[in-house]
Amino acid sequence: MDQTTAPLERAPVAAWSPTSWQGAIAAQQPDWPDEGHLARVLKHLCTQPPLVFAGEARALSAQLASVSRGEAVLLQAGDCAESMAAFSADVVRDKLKVILQMAAVLTYSAGVPSVKVGRIAGQFAKPRSSPTEVQHGVELPAFRGHMVNDLPFTPEARTPDPERLAGAYRQASATMHLLRSFTKGGYADLSQVHQWTTDFVASSAEGRRYEALAAEIDRAMDFMHACGFDIASAPNLHEVDFFTSHEALVLGYEEALTRQDPLTGRWYDGSAHFLWVGERTRQVDGAHVEFLRGVANPVGCKLGPASTPAEAVALCEALDPDRTPGRLTFVARMGTKLVRDVLPPLVAAVRAAGHPVVWACDPMHGNTFTSATGRKTRHFEDVVDEVAGFFEVHRALDSWPGGIHVELTGEDVTECVGGSESLTEIDLDDRYETMCDPRLNARQSLDLAFRVAELLRQ
Ligand code: PEP
Ligand code: CO
């Protein structure tokens, strides 16, 4: 038999360990200037407590399994890159507020539970299209996120500093602490549904629409109470499960926080509940896939417009060999022009291969362009249209459009154009604060949630 017609034999699965990724090619890693310094910081991180626990990661897997069955939607949202400079309790609270509002809109208007996952408490490292940046003839390392270096265009700021790994851990830990207090300590109580609106949102069209919905939620609660339902002792009405996630990019950091769960003997990456591999690092034989295949957390993988069905199936085999519902989420980021053409064969191939993945739509990363004023931006209507295309594709294939993955902030920024305030390219200069990609502001985020709820209801 010649090579091409020989039946495919399944290669034996190679042994995995938290360090096995080191034997593969790791794209997008910083050029640390002092390996000894890096080793000392990583050794210290190995001694630190994990930020999340195995049982919590398993709870998220169970919720994502319900998404894969079409019984819930995933709402994954947060910064493109978290900032160590603009960190405060208010910033975390405002981001949480807008995500809680979006979740209330999705759940109440569409009648589907939402699984809430932040791009938060660890989203500090960025892949870049070029390892260096040139300004006025000077070449310096590219900014790779606050886990690695800093934004100002100076040799000091741009040189990767391993101490930042420890700084990222400390900020992630403080953020985690705040999130746990907010979500379990009364702030996320449904009776607070009116309090989640920030002042600058309240006066807007979305703000008023939200207020009307919040009033309906109040009436629904009163109704249940009047029917004798014991609202006070129903925990689901008083606290929410809120999970953390980030791109598992700097693999030394992820390895250092990976621990073996004494209960199950399985390895969990304790840096976040959910980790994903980005569009630039998803090589099936690369170090990032190698690392993620061995951790028992639920994992994700971005799929850009050049993805092929064969690649998607190979990624499923590597990351979800046992076909476990909730284990793998594909985050499609095709761009509004391509989603309707590129996504269908991927969905069909993955289904034919029997993998029960969650499909989420990232309508941000395929729709970035540079404005005439030189700002990296996205148009709100492109974002909405990509989500609509994603829904159309799934509906046509009788597949569940599992959710959305978006970059947003709770602040009143001007980074994406369009939306009900009709932000223009000129307006971008007002409050353009992102360290990396342009985010939806709180009004645009709420508007998007209403649009997605309408799509879910159809
Ligand atoms: C991101 O999510 O910020 C990102 C870099 O995405 P992608 O890997 O899809 O380009
Ligand atoms: Co981004």
Image: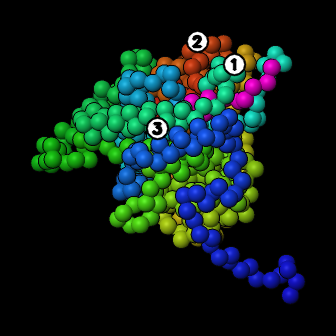
Callout 3: few (<14), some (14-19), or many (20+) C-alpha neighbours within 10 Å? many
Q: Are marks 3 and 2 in contact (CB under 8 Å)?
A: no
Quick one: quadrant of the N terminus?
Answer: bottom right
Would you say residue 162 is visible in this rendering?
yes
Q: Nearer the viewer, residue 381 or 273?
A: 273
In the current view of this chain or complex, which residue is farthest to the bottom? 1
Mark earlier in primary sequence (3, 2): 3
As drawn, 277 above or below 447: below
Judged from the image, the secondary structure of the residue bearing numbered disc 2 is loop
Could you tell whether 126 is left or right of 212 in the image? right
Residue at figure coordinates x 38%, y 67% from the top left: 264
Residue highlighted by disc 3: 169
* Nearer the camera: disc 2 or disc 1: 1
Could you tell whether 9 is left or right of 434 in the image? right
Q: Main secondary structure of the magenta part?
A: loop
Q: CA distance from mark 2 to mark 1?
A: 25 Å
Residue 444 image point, x, y percent? 52, 27
Q: Which residues are magenta?
A: 138-149
Would you say residue 69 is visible in this rendering?
no
Amino acid type, callout 3: Tyr
Indicate whether residue 119 is drawn in magenta: no
Residue at figure coordinates x 73%, y 18% from the top left: 374
Residue at figure coordinates x 68%, y 34% from the top left: 33
Indicate whether residue 146 is drawn in magenta: yes
